[in-house]
Image: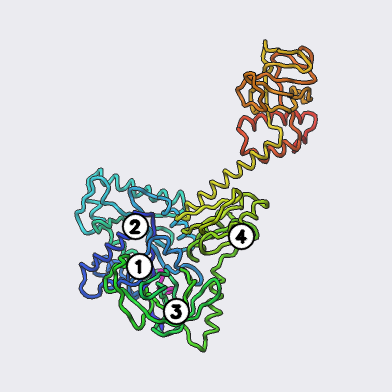
Amino acid sequence: MAKIRSPICSCLGHVDHGKSSILDKIRNTAIVQTEAGKITQAIGASIIPLSTIEKICGPLLKSLKMDFTIPGLLMIDTPGHAAFTSLRKRGGNLADIAILVVDINEGFKPQTIEAIEILKSFKTPFIIAANKIDLIHGWQKKDESILKNISSQGPETQKSFEKKMYELVGQLYEQFQLNAERFDRVEDYTNQVAIIPTSAETGEGIPELLMVLTGLAQKFLEQCLECTIEGPAKGTILEVKEEKGLGATMDVILYDGTLKVNDQIVIGSIEGPITTKIRALFEPSPLAEMRDKKSKFKSVKEVSAAIGVKISAPNTEGVIAGMPIRSTTQDNLETVKQEIASEVEESLIETDKEGIIIKADTLGSLEALTKLLKEKGIAVSKASIGDVSKKDIAEAESNYNKDPLLSAILGFNISTQPDITIPDTVKVITEKVIYTLIENFERWQEEKQKEIELGGLDQVTRPCKIEFLRGYVFRQNNPAVVGVEVLAGQLNSGIDLMKRDGIPITTVKSIQQEKESVTKVEKGKQVAASLDRVTVGRQINEGDILLSVISEDDFRKLKEFKTSLSKEEIELLKEIAEIMRKDNPVWGV
């Protein structure tokens, strides 16, 4: 029997911008305003019935003039993007819709940007809760309706509010090419992101947030929400936990079917499908706070989608978050195992022949990291779950000779196994924010590229321009020793010099700076240079300008490494090329 299940809604955003506070406020508002139909606290989620939403929203829902068939909302409680990236099913992310929480006073932060990138990569519709409006200078709560509250604020407060709102609108367009507007001004929800001003502290905007969320889910997601109550259960593992007296348990979001105690289940794993039987099913006590470790669970015989449930089952070692779970009978066990294996294979990351190594704590996180790396054109040769191992280090080290820029391991929400020595040729970067992880890797690659280029530049003749200073002839010849000033570039001992006619006339045998022998001198320095094969007054004269002689091969290499050259050196390189091309128009091309 098919029914419309509750849309699964994930709450994302930067740390301390109010994700948990908004969910807590929705729960508390429901408890205060309703007697029957209270919110049921499930594993890692809150089930908010439509009747509760109607009571919180009052006449707002009726104003939408919709025939509501969704039973309510299943709000994911676990922290931010971690839950979102863990929640996946075949064909995409398990969350049907999302709330992105942004502190209206702080704007976009790293985790906000990461959340939007993930939402876009999974093509998940979302709305924005512009939270903490109560902290805008001069803000006063005067009415239940957020729109009335905005219009009743003082002129300066209103002006400040509008400025902050449209800074968010501007940031969304500039950084992500997303059109956004305040929810009451949205003309088309299919191509505009709705922003709802809220305060988790005062409750302002919470009814409007629920109204927009419910309205969007009903209007655009109804066909996606059909599920079968009778029949095999389908779900995704949200977290794997050790529970006292139970051992390893799995917190699961069930999105299809019914699950019963003693049901045979198949769980996806990297090593192959795991078959086991449900020993027990648990739900928290009514209105229990799941983040409270003292919360007590009640044993249940069966649960139906969409819901969160804790499962106790033997032989589940090695199970990880993000993996699929299905119930099955003995008759179709092999078919389900093949389907699960296929689903895991589909979700495992398609890698490149050459690239960096990436690690993550869950399958969903790994997938999100890979998607964002691929969007930036960063190749991945290996993607796996768990801490950085000796094998990972060895594989990254083998990349060094092929391409030093690929001898890196990126780890999201993981650490390095103990007793591992990381060689200088391998870079390990671990972060708890995907956005920061990628940013740090790109910065390392830039620095490494410059290091490689500078090493390469040591093997070629650098562009240089010097002036023979008047009154500083220390020896006329054999070799000539004269005072010079470096006008541009870098003077190195051993290089050949020429005049503007392009003909080499001398070699720098040695350089003395303040009576000390040196091998190179930067722009602006005055030194004594020893020059062979020339006599002062014949081949060279005081006031002459001399330039370094650069071979065509060196010229081409310098063009490759031009990001490591100064603007002045690049200009000097052009000047030398012009001189050389007077006799040979294709010199250095």
Q: CA distance from mark 1 to mark 2?
A: 15 Å
Amino acid type at mark 2: Ala
Q: Which residue is mark 3?
A: 314
Quadrant of the snapshot with the N terminus: bottom left
Give the numbered dot on residue 433: none
Give the answer, above or below, for where 32 lies relative to 404. Answer: below
Residue 186 visible somewhere in the drawing: no
Q: Which residue is mark 2?
A: 129
Q: CA distance from mark 3 to mark 1?
A: 29 Å
Residue at far front of view:
419
Magenta residue span: 220-224
Give the numbered dot on residue 75: 1
Q: Earlier in the sequence, mark 1 or mark 2?
A: 1
Amino acid type at mark 4: Ser
Q: CA distance from mark 2 to mark 3?
A: 42 Å
Q: Residues within 10 Å of mark 3 (few under 14, many from 20)?
A: some
Q: Nearer the viewer, mark 4 or mark 1?
A: 4
Give the percent coordinates (x, y) of residue 526: 63, 19
Q: Residues within 10 Å of mark 4 (few under 14, many from 20)?
A: some
Q: Earlier in the sequence, mark 4 or mark 1?
A: 1
